[in-house]
Amino acid sequence: MDQKPWEVCSDLQEDRLKFVADIIRHVRRESAALYNPEDGDGPWSLGCRNYERLINIIERESHGKSWLSVKRKNNLGFWAFIGPVPIKFCKTDLMNASAEALKINSDDPVYQPQNVFEFDESTWHWRFIIETDEFGEALRIRIGQFTADGNVKNLHEIPMDDSAWGIIPTSKTLAEPVEIEKPKVSLKRVAKIINDEK
């Protein structure tokens, strides 16, 4: 029987997984809103926008959180770390996933409880699995452990939390609101201004 991620590794706490899943959902929702095939957008441009925004926003949101970090391999390669646990992201329908979609590379970092980092075909790697609709919006996000030879265990669906939408803006932080005095305009004043202009 599958265990919950936090039962396997205490660093993979449920609130942390939900936080990362909410970032994924938010990025994909915003990207889908900008997707316009009539203006030349296609699956490739949508995928690139989703991926690059996800890297940048997770990296930005990791500042000030001791449990979240990002390691870039080059401009586009990256791993997110929840505590010491490396996690990659995969957009696929898990039931029809290709070997390429869940591919594990020999240079993927590995977390083992003894902090031994070495590659082995039977080593278990954590992956966020993102299932989407035709416009790229996340329908379901799961986390599970995978091996290079295709075994899967401890698959866990991360619940959708619509109340969290919008708490992670993809734009820069807005300035503090400014209080503005109520305008001193009345209908009589507006009528006087109009009459004076005639």
Image: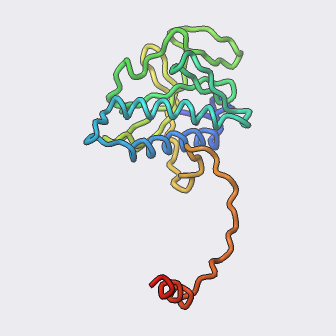
Q: Quadrant of the C terminus?
A: bottom left
Please determine whether, in this image, residue 146 is positioned above or below residue 107. Answer: below
Nearer-the-camera pick, 30 or 192: 192
Residue shown at the point (55%, 16%) measured from the top left: 74
Residue 1 seen in the current view: no
Q: Nearer the viewer, residue 168 or 132?
A: 168
* Left or right: 138 in relation to 163: left
Residue drawn at the location 59% of the way across and 27% of the way down = 80
Q: Position of residue 191 (x, y in %)?
A: 50, 88
Q: Is residue 5 above or below residue 113?
A: below
Question: Can you tell which quarter of the image residue 87 is in?
Answer: top right
Quarter of the view holding residue 117: top right
- Which residue is rendered at x = 59% and y = 51% of the image? 167
Q: Position of residue 121 (x, y in %)?
A: 50, 9
Quadrant of the rendered image containing residue 184: bottom right
Q: Is residue 70 above or below residue 27?
A: above
| One can see residue 194 in this view | yes
Q: Position of residue 36 (x, y in %)?
A: 31, 43
**Residue 1 position in % (x across, y down):** 51, 33
Q: Nearer the viewer, residue 100 or 49?
A: 49
